[in-house]
Image: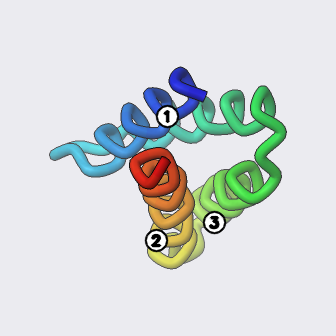
Amino acid sequence: PVAFWDDMAHADDLLNGAEPVFDYVTQFLAGVADSAGDTDLAQATRDLVKARTAGDSWGLPLTRLRGEIKSRLTDRIAI
């Protein structure tokens, strides 16, 4: 649980940096989601990858992924 929270904080930092590193962070989050059995996080990550790969607008998938991360960070803080 602590490591998962740390991973979410790291991903949040990467996505909100001056130059987000989307390829790295989506691979990182896919692995974290798989290890944690977090299907919602995994789906949000896949949706962002799919939109970017297809050349589609990826603002909405990115917003959803950020929301999933923030939700997990907030849940940890609430505990």
Observer-side mark, 2 or 3, equals 2
Q: Is residue 54 left or right of residue 17?
A: right
Q: Which residue is mark 3?
A: 51
Measured from the top left, where is residue 61 in percent x and y? 57, 70
Residue found at x 43% / y 56%: 74
Residues tagged 1 and 2 counted as in contact (Cβ below 8 A): no
- Mark found first going from the N terminus, 2 or 3: 3
Q: Residue at x 51, y 78 (%)?
A: 60
Q: Earlier in the sequence, mark 1 or mark 2?
A: 1
Residue located farthest toward the front when viewing the structure as drawn: 79
Task: Give the percent coordinates (x, y) of residue 12.
Answer: 37, 45
Quarter location, residue 59: bottom left
Label 2 residue SS: helix
Q: CA distance from mark 1 to mark 3?
A: 26 Å
Q: Report, in whole angstroms, how far the alpha carbon at label 2 lies from the one at label 3.
A: 12 Å
Is residue 38 found left or right of 52 in the rendered image?
right
Q: Is residue 28 left or right of residue 14?
A: right
Specify which label sits upstream in the sequence, 1 or 3: 1
Q: The N terminus appears in which quarter of the rendering?
A: top right
Q: Position of residue 45 (x, y in %)?
A: 65, 52
Q: Work out which residue is located at the far top of the displayed protein and give it.
A: 3
Amino acid identity at mark 3: Ala
The amino acid at mark 1 is: Trp
Contact (CB < 8 A) between labels 1 and 3?
A: no
Label 3: how many Cα within 10 Å (few below 14, some 14–19, many 20+): some
Residue 5 got which mark? 1
